[in-house]
Image: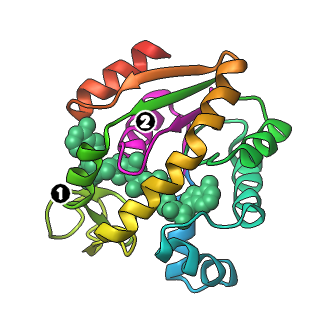
Amino acid sequence: MNIILFGPPGSGKGTQAKMMAGYLNNKHISTGDILREAQEKKTEMGQKASEYIKAGLLVPDKIVNSIIIEAIEKYKKKGFMLDGFPRNIFQAEFLASCIPIDKVVYINVPEEEILKRLSKRFSCKKCGRVYNKEGICSECQGELYIREDDKPVTIKKRIEVYQNEIQKILEYYTSKGLIKEIDGVGTPDEIFERIKTAL
Ligand code: AP5
Ligand code: MG
């Protein structure tokens, strides 16, 4: 199955995509994780993306679409959970021209909950896994850090960018009969059960 996990910053896309990819035995593809890895490795793409990520803005479609086409080519046999793509209507149309999508899960979380969650997130530098306290990653022993776009002012910007695009994306996938909306407030296990039921 090819599934999109759609939702605001901090809605738990990464958390749920990891759980779902394990459950469905398909591939978790996160454009944010891929971009951060490129930034860390200081590749040309990473350097181009950096200023947008730091400002909480969308990285240009051309860059992100090229990431997606490469990932899809690699994982189309296995199927995938897309986390963080598409983020605007042009990306959605580009995706439709590449591969069919089976479902779009919209994880709905209110802003006050997002701010609470992102203010205490620590991410692993090596594997991207998220935690809620400082330390090292229990999976790969990588160093935990606070993402550079998790500053309050940048979180606000990311939410604003998301709100500018959400309606068009929801309408686009609703017209295709693909949207399943779930309540994203609850424990990660509760949300996981809701997603499985919705699919
Ligand atoms: P990206 O990395 O995709 O960030 P995002 O969409 O803002 O989402 P987050 O990763 O912050 O949150 P999440 O929904 O994954 O939640 P998580 O599971 O971590 O993108 C970053 C940037 O890259 C963008 O701003 C843009 O610049 C660029 N970019 C990426 N894709 C792009 C694209 N397609 N086009 C253009 N630019 C692009 O959970 C959040 C926290 O909450 C964690 O601490 C977690 O432990 C906790 N948590 C999770 N679930 C629960 C729960 N049920 N209850 C309580 N806490 C929970
Ligand atoms: Mg994420």
Residue type, numbered disc 1: Asn
Residue 114 belongs to magenta span: no
Indicate yes or no: mark 1 CB to ligand 1 under 8 Å. Answer: yes
Magenta stretch containing residue 28, yes or no?
Answer: yes
Residue 99 in the image: state x and y as whole percent.
79, 35
The residue sitting at 25% across, 24% down in the picture is 190
Decide which of 122, 135 is in the foreground and name it: 122
Where does residue 106 sit, x and y in percent of width and height? Answer: 48, 30
Residue 11 at x, y percent in the picture = 36, 43
Q: Is residue 84 visible?
A: no
Q: Which residue is mark 1?
A: 132
Q: Residue at x 50, y 16 (%)?
A: 199
Q: Nearer the viewer, residue 50 or 199?
A: 50
Q: Element under label 2?
A: helix
**43 in relation to 188, above or below:** below
Residue 6 shown left or right of residue 87 in the figure: left
Judging by the rendered image, the residue that carries numbered circle 2 is 22
Hey, which quadrant is residue 171 in on the image?
A: top right
Q: Which residues are magenta?
A: 1-29
Q: Locate residue 166, reporting x and y percent.
A: 56, 40
Q: Nearer the viewer, mark 2 or mark 1?
A: 1
Q: In this image, 107 relative to 104: left or right?
A: left
